[in-house]
Amino acid sequence: MSTPAPSTRTGFGRVLVFVYGVFAVAATARALVQLATDASIAPVAYSLSLFSGLVYIAATWALGSDRRRLAMATILVELTGVLVVGTLSHPDDIDKASVWSDYGNGYGFVPLVLPFVGLWWLFRLGRADRGSAGPA
Amino acid sequence: MTTVQIVLGAAALLVALWLVVLIVLDRLPGDPVFGALVVLEVGVLVQLVIGLARVFGDHADVNTAAYLGYLVGALLVLPIGFVWSAGERTRSGTAVLLVAVVVLPFLSLRLHDLWSVR
């Protein structure tokens, strides 16, 4: 079996892209349902929810197509988003929640861990590329 | 939780454990695992049929759009995960299957939560 050239979507990246894809669908679908059924309850929170979905879509696409700069940018936005929304949100606002609320508590805190894993993966690939031999 | 969802959840956890063992031993899944995935997908289909019957039946405050979304989402997770994992015949490909299988019980839990406000 030949080893493909290292990219953001091979090896461990295969798993990462899938997890990002799951969150892209989960966050976007959640926001669309929220906005479609009762947008008036919390328009800001629901818009934020939609924004998080779009960030996950962009990150999934960037990681899936080996666009590393875009991947880095979207993951940094994602990290900022989960930290800011996590800090400002109240755990009681279940009806007004987004994926990032309460640091992603409703999703097993995966939204908090995911950007760090994404950054680690990008840095690791960057280092592997700079080494002339590359990963075995 | 319906009986189907409890059985489905337990089966998903067993298959997940199986995949973890394969990943640790660095072995690729074979036909027995693929068979187990098909069985899981059949369980998801049963969940879908029961869910559809419920949604179009008598209920008061259930968020129908969200409920349908989770039903359909659950149906798609395994096939998409399977296709995506097939492109990487390594531990990582197996880990994709693991993620897909682990997501299933969480979707069932959400369905249960959505339904229990009725």
Image (tube, rainbow, N blue to C red):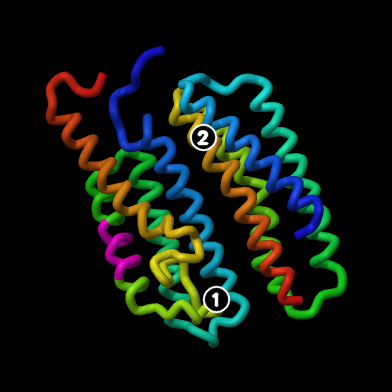
Q: Residue at x 13, y 30 (%)?
A: A130
Q: Label 1: how many residues lie within 10 Å, few (<14), some (14-19) or many (20+)? A: some
Which residue appears at 70% of the width and 31% of the height?
Answer: B36
For residue B84, the mark is: 2
Q: Main secondary structure of the magenta part?
A: helix
Amino acid type shown at disc 2: Trp
* Image position, residue A118 (x, y; %): 31, 47
What is the number of the mark on residue A35?
A: 1
* Residue A79 drawn in magenta: yes
Label 1 element class: helix
Instruction: Measuring from the top left, give residue A29's x and y in whole percent.
Output: 55, 63
Question: In this orientation, which residue lies closer to the viewer: B44 or B21?
Answer: B21
Specify whether disc 2 shares its chain with disc 1: no
Q: Quadrant of residue B66?
A: bottom right
Q: CA distance from mark 2 to mark 1?
A: 30 Å
Tell me if mark 2 has few (under 14), some (14-19) or many (20+) residues whose alpha carbon lies within 10 angstroms of its own: some
Quadrant containing the N terminus of chain A in the rendered view: top left
Q: Is residue B105 above or below residue A9?
A: below
* Magenta stretch in the rendered image: A76-83
Q: Quadrant of residue A6?
A: top left
Residue B53 in picture, x, y percent from top left: 85, 61
Percent from the top left, x then y, of residue A71?
Answer: 29, 49
